[in-house]
Image: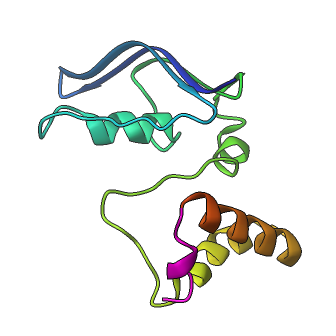
Amino acid sequence: MTILEARDIEFRKNGKTIIDVDAFHLYEGEVTALIGVNGAGKTTLMQILALLQQPTAGKVFFKGEQAQKNNLLRLRKKMAFVFQQPLLLDMTVRKNIETGLRLRGVSPQEIKNRVEEWLEKLGISHLAEG
């Protein structure tokens, strides 16, 4: 299943094309790396894909739904974005994960279930209280 799709994405700044991507697909269960030299536009592309930056041209779809001004906030609430520089609170790994879910209005029981599931999936259960 396609989770994220971008079509004909272009981003221009000061008359210069920073991003020019014909098509991008991210599928459920995949891990994707975005690699490039400094200034290549990796961060800008990630911001566009995370619906944090509007492209100059093109369309972004999240789970088949086109991102538009009237649904950006709702779609963003269904996404997660990991920043290049970690933004961790002075808490355990478990508490940092729980905080993000709590801010999204997830129930305490669901938070517990999701945190346990992902700590295990990522192989970091042993780091949960550190």
- The reply, left or right, for residue 25 in relation to residue 101 is left
Q: Is residue 125 above or below residue 72?
A: below
Q: Is residue 96 visible?
A: no
Q: Position of residue 63 (x, y in %)?
A: 70, 28
Q: Is residue 56 above or below residue 78?
A: above
The residue stretch that appears in magenta: 123-130
| Residue 125 belongs to the span the image colors magenta | yes
Q: Residue furthest left?
A: 38
Q: Residue at x 55, y 89 (%)?
A: 129
Q: Residue at x 87, y 75 (%)?
A: 109
Q: Position of residue 94 (x, y in %)?
A: 60, 80
Q: Is residue 4 visible?
A: yes
The front one of 72 and 110 is: 110
- The reply, left or right, for residue 98 in relation to residue 109 is left
Q: Residue at x 77, y 71 (%)?
A: 111
The quadrant of the picture occupied by the N terminus is top right
Residue 112 sits in quarter: bottom right
Residue 10 sits in quarter: top left
The front one of 97 and 59 is: 97
Q: Position of residue 21 (x, y in %)?
A: 36, 15
Q: Residue at x 73, y 45 (%)?
A: 74
- The reply, left or right, for residue 94 in relation to residue 111 is left
The secondary structure that most of the magenta stretch takes on is loop
